[in-house]
Image (cartoon, rainbow, N blue to C red):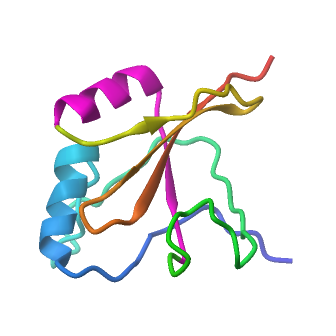
Amino acid sequence: MIKVLGIGGIFFRAKDPDALGRWYDETFGITKVTESYDDPAWTQEGGTTVFAPFKQDTTYFGRPEQQWMINFRVADLDATVAALREAGITVAVDTERHPNGRFAHLSDPEGNPIELWQEMPKP
């Protein structure tokens, strides 16, 4: 078996790629890839990455035709949610504390689901 090192990119279709790229940059600090290989790409902090295929009929992503959802790790869920709400973005916080952390959900301007995750430290 060959083991990969991590996720090298997330690629998806968008109605307006430039506007959506700006939204992710302005909202989460995720630098949009430019036309030049000399410009730096977004570099994420090391940590847990969950790779989890779901059943075709899951309702966890929202719309039935939605084929993916991205999950971003955050250091402080409450502060992140407060900043997003201050920017006028609707965020639903899961009130249940799960063994692996806390979660919140929102959508980008094109309706793609986003999950925020504050990972709980291992005892």
With 23 as the anchor, is 71 left or right in this view?
A: right
The quarter of the image holding the C terminus is top right
Residue at 79% x, 76% y is: 2
Q: Which quadrant of the rendered structure holds the N terminus?
A: bottom right
The answer to which of 78 and 60 lies nearer the viewer is: 60
Which residue extends farthest right? 1
Q: Position of residue 92 (x, y in %)?
A: 44, 38
Quadrant position of residue 121 = top right
Q: Would residue 76 be visible to someone looking at this image?
A: no
Q: Is residue 48 magenta?
A: no
From the viewer's side, name the closer residue of 8 and 11. Answer: 11
User: Looking at the image, which residue is at 39% across and 66% down?
Assistant: 112
Q: Is residue 78 magenta?
A: yes
Tell me the residue at 25%/32% (across/down).
85
Q: Using residue 18 as the reference point, say whether residue 90 is left or right of it.
A: right
| Residue reaching furthest to the top | 123
Residue 39 image-quadrant placement:
bottom left
Instruction: Tell me if I can see residue 92 in this picture.
Output: yes
Q: Which residues make up the magenta segment?
A: 67-87
Which of the pair 60/39 is nearer the observer?
A: 60
- Side of 119 relative to 99 (left or right): left
Q: Is residue 20 above or below residue 90?
A: below
Say if 109 sits above or below 123 in the image: below
Q: Quadrant of residue 101?
A: top right
Q: Position of residue 122 (x, y in %)?
A: 76, 23
- Mark count: 0
Residue 116: where, in percent of width, then height? 48, 42
